[in-house]
Amino acid sequence: MSYDPSNVFARILRGEIPAPLLHEDDRCVAFRDVNPQAPLHALVIPKQALRGLVDAGPEDEATLGHLLLVGRNLAAKLGYPDARYVINHGAGAGQTVFHLHVHVLAGRPLAWPPG
Ligand code: 5GP
């Protein structure tokens, strides 16, 4: 399926929906989830228009790694040594916004497996 540029994260990237940024660099931004599931619930998203993980190719390897390192650094900077990093891919796996994103969850005990 093709990338829909009207998704909310594309709109955040264009500044059409406000989202105070926790981090920004040339490849990604991070901001807090509007419906947090933990004391820290951040989303790290690439600036690149990628619908989901399956749409990333070998040329996106560095970007994918970068999202994880930015998420990890953010959790550490905000004082959370333990954190969970989640990518939901596809509606059946819980993806609701079709712009690739890494959830960073921390600050409470996190059960396994997730629901
Ligand atoms: P998904 O379910 O696709 O893995 O995650 C999408 C996340 O985006 C959800 O946790 C949802 O709460 C969050 N979200 C949806 N719309 C907005 C928004 O307008 N602003 C922010 N900051 N988060 C949003």
Image (cartoon, grey):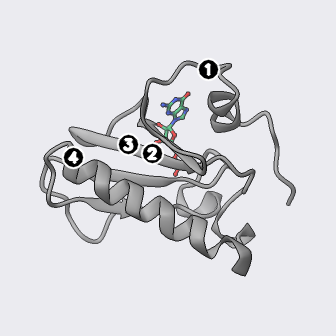
Instruction: Name the disc covering residue 42, or none.
Output: 3
User: What amino acid does circle 4 point to?
Assistant: Lys
Instruction: Name the disc covering residue 65, or none.
Output: none
Question: Mark 4 or mark 1, which has the lower sequence index?
Answer: 1
Few, some or many residues within 10 Å of mark 4 (<14, 14–19, 20+): few
Secondary structure beneath dot 1 equals loop
User: Percent from the top left, x then y, of residue 102?
Assistant: 47, 56
The residue pinned by badge 4 equals 77
The residue pinned by badge 1 equals 17
Few, some or many residues within 10 Å of mark 1 (<14, 14–19, 20+): few
Evaluate whether residue 36 shows in this view. yes
Question: Mark 4 or mark 2, which has the lower sequence index?
Answer: 2
Instruction: Name the disc covering residue 43, or none.
Output: 2
Disc 3 from disc 4: Cα separation: 13 Å
User: Percent from the top left, x then y, of residue 87?
Assistant: 49, 62
Disc 4 from disc 2: Cα separation: 15 Å
* Contact between labelled residues 3 and 2, with CB atoms less than 8 Å apart: yes
Name the residue at 71% across, 81% down: 58
